[in-house]
Image: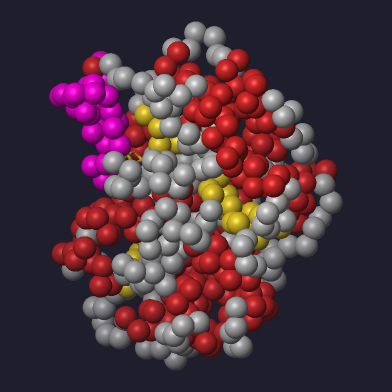
Amino acid sequence: MKNESYFRIFREAVRLQKEGRLIDGIENISIEDMDEGLLRGYIASALGQEPEEGISLTELAKKALREYEMNKPILTVTGECEDDCREAGVHKCVKSCPFESIFYDRKASRIKISKEDCTGCSECIDACHKKKIIDKIQYFPIANIIRDHKAPVYAAIAPAFAGQFGEGITAGKLRTAFKMLGFDDMVEVAIFADILSIREAVEFDRLVKEVGDFMITSCCCPIWMAMLKKHYRALVEHVTPSVSPMIAAGRVLKKLVSEAKVVFIGPCVAKKAEAKEPDVAGAIDYVMTFDELNEVFKVSEINISELKEDISDCSSKGGRIYARTGGVSQCIEETLEKISPKRMIKLKAVQGNGVKECKELLDKAIKGEIDANFLEGMGCIGGCVGGPKVVIDKETGRVKVNEYGEQAEYKTPVDSLCVLKVLGGIGFEIIDELKEENEKTRIFRRKL
Ligand code: SF4
Ligand code: SF4
């Protein structure tokens, strides 16, 4: 659920920054009746900073424009906690965490989060009825690198974007809007979902040879991957070693344009955590969410519906429907059918929809009780269209994503000339080269 007070503060800070008064005006931001500690925490977090004691908000604003330390926790816990939310002695946020990453520090009498273990699943944000847990916003350092323009800055927009910025907002109009904000260009991450689907179909061929074999796809949810890596190590041998489409987008853009900075925009707090994971860090420089970006467009008075169309990427239907539960399975199944039509054992998929279902699915997989050979998991109910930072409800999001999929010129990734064009830019001559394990395809792999 959107935290209106937090967004009010963020909007005000963006307004000050646009007017060139962020540093002078930050101390004057206020919200009636808001506790001082909470207000300070919200302002610091809206600036992407920790509300460190002894540092003024003016200093934090200066820091915000100068740097964003990637090693900061993605969440901020503001102020001390009362005991009144405890149930059987356990705070609500602590109880809500599926990863045991949040705890009550008795000595400091406050809630703390382990930045190494936190996946950004957002359960604790929703669980805190006092709204004391919030995710840091990375907008200000982005505005700074755009202004300095020492390197090209790219926006990589998640496949779930369809419908999030208003009725009739196409990828072409959105690209124009990003350019108005000062970005050099925008790419659709769906193109990289296309590329990874071919890799995943190849992996299926490798891993599923007999009845009883199964594959767990690593595309594309970081919550699903965190569950596997932290709690279901025994299943990791079935997981494909592919990076997510977000990471692939960052790596490829940086290979195509040296020094490029890449900002991922999606519906997800967990992507803020994924961008910092040690084996993939460096691909994505900053992460923003749809609702944060929407506020920036509003304050910047950019009315996207009135903008002219720029060119659109030609992602396939398969890459576009990644944004809803079942989309990954459908895309990889159809891709497999194209690359291996005579295969005797066909892909039979099952999905985990939300953390609870993902757990149940993986428990069954451990016990050998799965009647499927392809497992897809989405940390949010409905998939990314149900992510914590969407602007529209998940049912409408699903409809919009499906509509956008149907509008695609290409049905599957292997039909797409755009896939070939992107791959050509990084040295591939034919799509079939994606089937190989070599230096070229290393860009799409990760350690498990
Ligand atoms: S965001 Fe999720 S993983 Fe991180 S502390 Fe909160 S509940 Fe735990
Ligand atoms: S399903 Fe949710 S947690 Fe997973 S990538 Fe999508 S928005 Fe993020």
Q: Residue at x 64, y 34 (%)?
A: 295
Compared across the picture, whether 77 is left or right of 10 comes to left
Is 137 situated above or below 334? above
Query: What span is in magenta?
Result: 84-113
Is 321 situated above or below 294? below
Residue 84 x %, y %: 25, 15
| Residue 234 quadrant | bottom left
Compared across the picture, whether 175 is left or right of 240 comes to right
Asked if residue 370 lies in the magenta stretch, the reply is no
Residue 174 visible in this rendered orientation of the protein = no
Residue 70 x %, y %: 45, 47
Residue 127 x %, y %: 34, 30
Compared across the picture, whether 370 is left or right of 435 comes to left
Compared across the picture, whether 140 is left or right of 366 comes to right
Work out whether residue 14 or residue 334 is closer to the camera in this orientation and state it: 14
Residue 183 x %, y %: 71, 51
Q: Residue at x 59, y 56 (%)?
A: 262
Q: Residue at x 62, y 61 (%)?
A: 260
Asked if residue 102 lies in the magenta stretch, the reply is yes
Q: Residue at x 39, y 23 (%)?
A: 53
Is 32 situated above or below 250? above
Residue 256 visible in this rendered orientation of the protein = yes
Where, quadrant-wise, is the C terminus in this rendering? Answer: bottom left
| Residue 237 quadrant | bottom left
Work out whether residue 69 or residue 287 is closer to the camera in this orientation and state it: 69
Work out whether residue 414 or residue 101 is closer to the camera in this orientation and state it: 101
Is 115 situated above or below 14? below
Colour scheme:
secondary structure
